[in-house]
Amino acid sequence: MKAFLKKESTQKLLASLLSILIGLVVGAIVVLIVGLFNKSISLKGAWEGIRLIFIGILSTGRSASGALTWGFNPASIGNMLFRATPLIMTGLSVALAFKTGLFNIGAPGQYLMGTLATLFIALSIPSGALPGWLIWLLAFLGGLLAGALWGAIPGLVKAFLNINEVLACIMTNWIAANLVTWAFDVSNLKNMVEGTKSGYIYKTTYGLVDGSYVDGAGVATAKLGLDKLFPGSQINAGILVAILLAIGVYILISKTTLGYELKACGANRHAARYAGIHDKRNIVLSMALSGALAAAGASLYFLSGNTEFFWSTYQSLPAAGFNGIPVALLALNNPIGVIFSAIFMAMLNIVGLQLTNLTAYNEYITDVIIAVIVYLSAFSLAIRMLIAGRSKKKKAAEEPKRTPTEPPVKPEDAKNEKGGDKA
Amino acid sequence: MTFLIQQTLIYAVPLMIVALAGVFAERSGIINLALEGIMIFGAFMGVLFVNLSQTAGWFIEAKAAGDWMALQGFELLAMLVAALMGAIFSLLLSFASINLRADQTIGGTALNLMAPALVLFFIRLIANQNTLQMATGDSASWFMIKKSTLGFDKNADLGFLGNTLLHKVYLATYVCILIFIILSIILYKTRFGLRMRSCGENPQAADSLGINVYKMRYAGVTISGALAGMGGFVYSLTTANCTSNGDVAGFGFLALAVMIFGNWKPLNIAGASLLFGLFKCIAAAYSSLDINGDGVYMLAQIGISSHLYRMLPYVITLVVLAFTSKGSRAPKAEGIPYDKGSR
């Protein structure tokens, strides 16, 4: 048991689980305090809220007598997996950049550019001109390409002009938000068929038939029978694509030369250059790959056929992009871990909906929980030392010169080089 | 022209004050990526304060009595509340990055996620919708200073300067400019300012001279939080129609851009924020903008989309950064947790 606890990977895992637990407890405490101070909620409502926060995914609604009922809820589980799909992709995007020592806060912008390219391709090709699967594939790859190009911009200015990538990413995010709004504003893809849907782009199930859009003539991700497994949910094969891509990123990072070079650049850019690795090329490549991954999240989300894009997005950035950051941090940048942390985030998302539907609380409490988890992961080193606790102290007494465990996520470049004070 | 100057000022002032907030944090050595989050939090707290004092009835009395001084006093008080709450919220960042030596970028991101979540959670509980109004009725006009407020006749002509600076303006704008000037002087001309800046350049050297780096960094981030919180409230007062909805439309990030654009120097920042404010103003009102008052809407006639004007500040920042990145002078020690033992 002791040896198990001492293992670094175990400690990392425990630190993540502890962060999750603390996050959930903080959420529960907020719910409790609000319940105590708000007369219309009272202690009974607060208790319902707390139970929903922890096991809301198993909620099946309320019984006739008004009590919460619990059990396997296929619609919730299916929707959870559906919502996890873009999160896995943006999480992978942030994690891959972290591996190269870059903080990709530009995922929202890359996500938006992916949305733009995917929707334009999927909706512009007249249905029947090409087979449906080919249109789907073109739209998906187009999204990837757009994201890669957009992600390459911060990479390029970082590598060649030494501009901090966090700043470049923030700028490109807002440029993307305005650009996407602009492009859709002048396009003819705004949903005109359904009168109540003003401000939305056509779903991809709409296809161009003789110059006008008809529902059902477009493309959508195949369901592969998953909708039978989780009836009543929006799930489709996108989740499988996302998992495959996660495995692909894992192989890229841990089993290939390119992955090794990327990691070497992340560990120490200057040492990597000394070892003959093209550090500049790798920074650009890493950001481009990250961009493609984030954009793939958007493509999978909007090609599902039951999601609509609100095009006037210039004042806000998509949450799916930002949520890639907590997903990656929680998974400690492990691509396989990203799958699970994204599913966890999606579960919180569903829990939030259950809270809104069933209690007087609302879904934003789950965002508070996510924020607490990110906050804790910022000093995960301190938490890990806490877990290692006594055994480490003993060890320190035995061998006083032993170095502490290697620090976790450290985008070194983000810290040392801002705005180019280093050549 | 009057309209253009007024609107530009209205957009520029929150940017300016929040960019100065960024300067205080970074000059002390802490990257404050959480400006956006702190703005959101401050805006909410200020709006909530006005909302509660209105429910308590003080507000209506002052309004009914036509007591404009009291109303302006409320405005100042709300700014103070927002600043105080912003400072308290920023303690989360200082604690993580100074005491626990956490990654400042991630800590700031956490605060950016936290603020809208918390704010929207409470707004939903309080107002049952996603926006919290400051007060019922046209609260923007309650706080606005007009000719009649100052005792002039409604049709009196105050000349160009008078019309521009005294009619339809907010006290908050001028207070912010005053605070900006005072704090810039403190940062550059006092012992405290010099010590704080030294902690952002070479904390080891500062420490060797007996300066408490931890305290200085706490001071920097706390001042930063107060300014950002106040800026958030000013934003919601002057540009967001006196509401709080868990969003400041990227002003915090834009302020970060202004700070870098201005090379971490107050005077340049003032200039940069005016430029950015001008673009924001043009983007918002270009179709009805009559620059020289001859009834010709020049910008509308050129026919450039408002999307372009909205995008320009970010594009310009990126391009300018690309050209000046070699000469830009970020505080040397920013982003690096201070460790007494390291050399």
Image (tube, coloured by chain):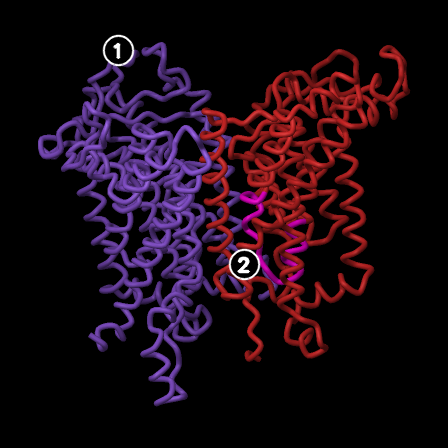
Q: Secondary structure at mark 1?
A: loop
Looking at the magenta stretch, what is its main secondary structure? Answer: helix
Q: Residue at x 75, y 34 (%)?
A: B173
- What residue do we see at 57% from left, 57% from top? B31
Tell me the distance, in whole angstroms, between the alpha carbons under discs 2 and 1: 50 Å
From the top left corner, tell me how far across and down residue A75 is, in percent.
Answer: 18, 31
Drawing shade for chain A: purple
User: Per the image, is B33 magenta?
Assistant: yes
Magenta segment range? B21-38
Q: Is residue B70 visible?
A: yes
Task: Name the amino acid type tagged 2.
Answer: Asn
Which labelled disc corresponds to residue A210?
1
Does residue A274 sit above or below A129 in this rendering? below
Q: Is residue B56 above or below residue A54?
A: above
Which residue is denoted by mark 2 in the rendering?
A: A162
Residue B327 makes an appearance in the image: no
Image quarter in which the N terminus of chain B is found: top right
The chain coloured red is B
Which chain does the residue under circle 2 lie in? A
Residue A392 at x, y percent in the picture: 35, 79
Looking at the image, residue A413 sits to the left or right of residue A133; the answer is right
Looking at the picture, does residue A272 appear above or below residue B286?
below
